[in-house]
Every structure is written in C-alpha cells, then in structure tokens.
Amino acid sequence: MHGHKLQAAVLFAGGAMLAATFAMAAEQKQPVQTGTIVTVVPKKEAPGGVPQSALHLKVNGKNTEITRFMPLHSPESDVELVVLIDDGARTSLGTQMSDIAKFIQNLRPGTKVSVGYMFNGMAQLAGPLTTDHNAALRGLHLPVHGGAAISASPYFCLSSLAKNWPSSDMHARREVVMITDGIDYYEVRYDPEDPYVQAAMDDAVRAHLIVYAIYWRSADFLDRTEYGADDGQNLLAQLTAGTGGTSYWQGLGNPVSFVPYFEDISRRLDNQYEMEFMTTIGDKPEMQSIKLSVSAHVKVDAPQEVWVYPVSK
C-alpha cells in the first residue's frame, strides 16, 4: 500500500516537473534589438546635442543598455509629415492658414508632406505625400464643415491615419501635426484613462508616428467652457507625450499665431536621434514600456512605449 502511494507521488512529481519544463519552454524569451526615434529638445546652454553616455533607459522597468544613438541631421534622413486639421474647427482658423502654409513651404527640402482633415472619425488626405511643398499646399483649405463633433473623435482620426499611413517606407521618420480641440465626443467626461486616447497612442506607436498637437477651439458649445478646453488640452498632452511629441496651447483661448509652435516643431525635427537597444520577447509582438532619462542639461522626449517584434525564423 505504501509502495503504491510512493509510486503515485513519484509519478505526480514527475508530471509536475514535466509541466513546469513545458511552461518554461513556452515562456522562454529571445533577445532582440529594437529602436525608436527620440528628440533632444534644443537649449542654448547645451549646443551640439547630447552624448549617449548621458542617457539612461529602462524597458519594462529594467535598466537596459543603449546600443546605438545616432543623430538624424543629414539631408539623406527621410522625413514624412502630415498636417492633420480638424474639419470641425471654427472657420476663424483662416487667420492661421498663412502660418500653416509657411511652415509647409519652409520644411527642409526632401521632406515629404501631405495635408489631411479629420472627418467622421477618419483621416482624409488631400493628396499623397510629396516633396513638392507647393503642390501639397493645394490641399490646404478652411475647414469645410466647421460644425460640432464633425471629426467625432480626433483620436479615431489619428488611429485611422496610423493604420493607413500613405507610405511603406519604414526607414523614414513619420511625423504628424494635429490641429484640433482634442475633445473626445465619444467619451465627453474627462478620463485620464480614456480608451480611445490609449488606442490612438498604441496605433501611433505601432506605426512609428511622432505626434504634435496644436490646440484650437472649435465651434461646439463644449469648447466654450473651461471644462471642455481643459479636457481637450489634457488628452492631447497625454497623447503627444506617449508618442514622443509635444502639445501646444495658450490658456483657454486660441493663439494669435501658430508661428512659435511651428518654429519649435522645426527645431525638434532638426534634433532627432535614432536610439537602438536590446530587449527580450516571446513568440509574438508585444508593446513594451520605455522610460528614458538624461543626466545632461537638456530635455529628451521619447515615446513611453515601443512595439517589439520577435526575430523572424
């Protein structure tokens, strides 16, 4: 009797060990090299960028070595940029049309650009990405509809753009400048964990988009309240920070000029770096959180997450 119990115990222990072995094999992760684009925010006291040794990276909370940190300053560094305008914005946005046009015209030669509009939850491009900046300007016009919630959600529109980016060049930097009030009409109450904002952020990261946002109040009643303005601005700040970009606003009203914002975006485009590092992953792609800090006297903007692929076999 005792022998049968002992034999059963041994078999059980062996089965448990076998199951644990299979589980460990299933959870085994492989090292992969991945990367992302980061921006060194220019400051007068620290010209010339930042050395790799001044950067400290954590991936999923663990210290991680940066294997490559290369400036993207050369004319051969491809840039693709979409100016995405909320089609529900007030027609008073016309006062900013010349600033938008000058920004597009002054982009570095070779930069591919297109103008798009947020409409019914989708991003509708007026033309293809082109290095002919004057041709791109032919797609620039006042918001056609200018009514409340025409875009439905700027975050749906950004997801639409991310999933249908008009280029397959994975080596180009992909930049988006959104002009919108940032209010999510599908989730009107302010929610710091708004699922549509998070989904847009994830879609942008998967598509390697860096997003900048310029706050512009639309024609809707909600925009005329402190709640509406604060809500939209906070959501846009959350979205842009998550992709390694930034957002711009001026109190609760509209800015007199977009020029200072566009000048800052242009400086950022001239101070971007490609950062590569090692991480581990299983058999399926996954989103990993990253946190980049710097010990030098500069500010560095990086995405808060990165989409990692396993090595193809």
Image: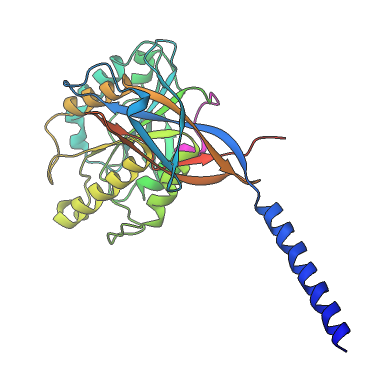
Q: Is residue 142 magenta?
A: no
Colour mapping used in the image: rainbow
Q: Is residue 312 left or right of residue 192?
A: right
Residue 160 in view here: no
Specify start and end residues of the magenta stretch as a single range: 160-169
Residue 231 place in picture, x, y as percent: 23, 54
- 187 over 6 or under it: above or below: above
Most foreground residue, 136 or 280: 280
Most foreground residue, 39 or 25: 25
Residue 115 place in picture, x, y as percent: 37, 27
Could you tell me which residue is drawn at 31 percent across and 21 percent down? 271
Could you tell me which residue is drawn at 20 percent across and 44 percent down? 217
Task: Name the image quarter holding the N terminus.
Answer: bottom right
- 230 over 268 or under it: above or below: below
Residue 66 place in picture, x, y as percent: 45, 30
Q: Is residue 167 magenta?
A: yes
- State whether the magenta stretch is mostly helix, strand or loop: loop
Could you tell me which residue is drawn at 40 percent across and 37 percent down? 57
Most foreground residue, 232 or 59: 59
Could you tell me which residue is drawn at 41 percent across and 56 percent down? 195
Most foreground residue, 187 or 58: 58
Quarter occupied by residue 45: top left
Residue 213 place in picture, x, y as percent: 28, 37
Q: Is residue 8 left or right of residue 245?
A: right
Residue 85 in view here: yes
Name, please, the residue furthest toward the bottom: 1
Q: Is residue 220 left or right of residue 80?
A: left
Q: Is residue 114 left or right of residue 241?
A: right
User: How many labels, in total?
Assistant: 0
Task: Name the image quarter holding the C terminus.
Answer: top right
